Image (spheres, grey):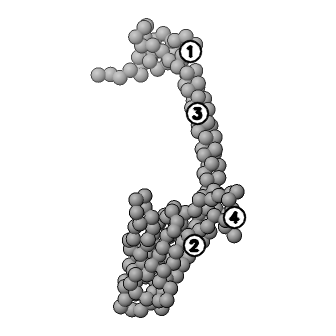
Amino acid sequence: MCVLVPYCFAGATLKEGNKTVTWDPENKSESYPRTHKLVIKQCILGHEAAADEFNVVQVETMTIRDTLRIPIAVLKVGETRQCRMDLEFSDAPVTFTLVEGKGPVHIHGQHLLGSLVEEFEDMEELEEEGLDEEEADEDEDEDGAQQKKKPKLTNNSKGAGKPAAGGAGGPAGNDKNRKRK
């Protein structure tokens, strides 16, 4: 049941006699509205498909301005039996049609439930904020440690060889460590 998980398996078969399938989820609960998204992962040509026949799957969906009809898969026995894809449709309805061939063509994907996905995204954002705060604390610790080490260095411009306040002589005060020309 989709209510307990962030997504459900989605699938359809296009074939002779059933060449069109429409995905159009309904919002059944007005008190807990959901957004829906369909993600198509692959189209597979069935084993009983005819040999010298192209099977063309077309999708029809809405864009911002108008309706879009475009082929998404061309399958043929002996050449291409499957087509992997990653197509997302956030606006229903989405209609798949077998515009050429007798099929069968199997369409597989996921039906994402928006409200549950948003809850998981909120949890991820909170976790990321926590990680960012921890990294900031670590950076402050490293800066503090570096600041403690700085007074131990010597100053070459003022009296070479004399240690700075709070530390013993360092490599800058030692003539043996200087580069020779």
- Depth order, front residue of 5/97: 97
Residue at x 56%, y 15% (from the top left corner)? 167
The N terminus - image quarter: bottom right
Tag 3 residue? 136
Q: Are marks 1 and 2 in contact (CB under 8 Å)?
A: no
Local SS, label 2 = strand
Tag 1 residue? 167
- Depth order, front residue of 64/159: 64
Report, in whole angstroms, how far the alpha carbon at label 1 lies from the one at label 3. Answer: 29 Å
Tag 4 residue? 3
Residue at x 44%, y 71% (from the top left corner)? 60
Sooner in the amino-acid sequence: mark 1 or mark 2: 2
1 or 2: mark nearer the eye:
2
Q: Amino acid at mark 2?
A: Ala
Report, in whole angstroms, how far the alpha carbon at label 1 lies from the one at label 2. Answer: 70 Å
Report, in whole angstroms, how far the alpha carbon at label 2 lies from the one at label 4. Answer: 15 Å
Sooner in the amino-acid sequence: mark 2 or mark 3: 2
